[in-house]
Amino acid sequence: MTKQKSADRQTGRVISQNKKAFHDYEILETFEAGMVLMGSEVKSLRDGRANLKDSHAKIRSGEIFLFALHISVYTNASYNNHEPERVRKLLLHKREIKRLVGKTVERGLTLVPLKLYFKDGKVKVELALARGKKQYDKRESLKRKEGAREMDRLRKRHELA
């Protein structure tokens, strides 16, 4: 086994993150889910070739599916390579799925993938139960972040003086 593969199994290496989700959504709760993948998809993910940017999860007939996750085609695979943006099934416990169904239907919340990573040699997705932000909420959070950054700069400057 190569050093890279053994490091993946132990550390939980992050493959891809959805940084835009933190800007567009208010994150309320997070879940860890497994994914049903083909072999060529896992090999492509080991190379770090995935994009979570516009992906989202939906609940269909008691199961959760991930849409618009782009996993690039693995170049060394044979004729049975995978479709880059196919719908992928997520693996959660039944009680977690029921809870998510209740929350998404009742309150109008959405399921957004935040992070794709390896854990113990398996690909995992960090799903978030999120509420969409309005434009003024986005501006407010940017102002808050900028204010905190400015305070840190002043504090550092004051400590050095």
Image (tube, grey):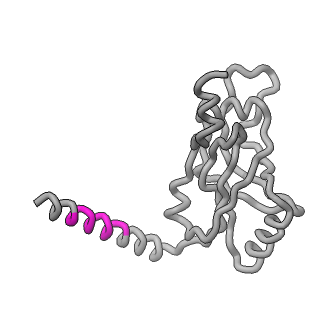
Residue positioned most to the front: 10
> Which residue does the image show at 55% across and 60% down from the upper left?
21
Residue 160 as seen in the image, left or right of residue 104: left
Residue 2 image offset from top left, x and y in percent: 62, 22
> Which residue does the image show at 77% across and 33% down from the upper left?
82
Q: Main secondary structure of the magenta part?
A: helix
Which residues, given as a range, are shown in magenta?
A: 145-155
Residue positioned most to the left: 161
Give the quadrant of residue 41. Answer: top right
Give the quadrant of residue 140. Answer: bottom left
Residue 34 image offset from top left, x and y in percent: 75, 49
> Which residue does the image show at 63% across and 44% down from the upper left?
117
Q: Quadrant of the C terminus?
A: bottom left
> Which residue does the image show at 62% across and 38% down from the upper left?
10
Residue 112 image offset from top left, x and y in percent: 65, 60
Residue 139 as seen in the image, left or right of residue 112: left
Q: Quadrant of the N terminus?
A: top right
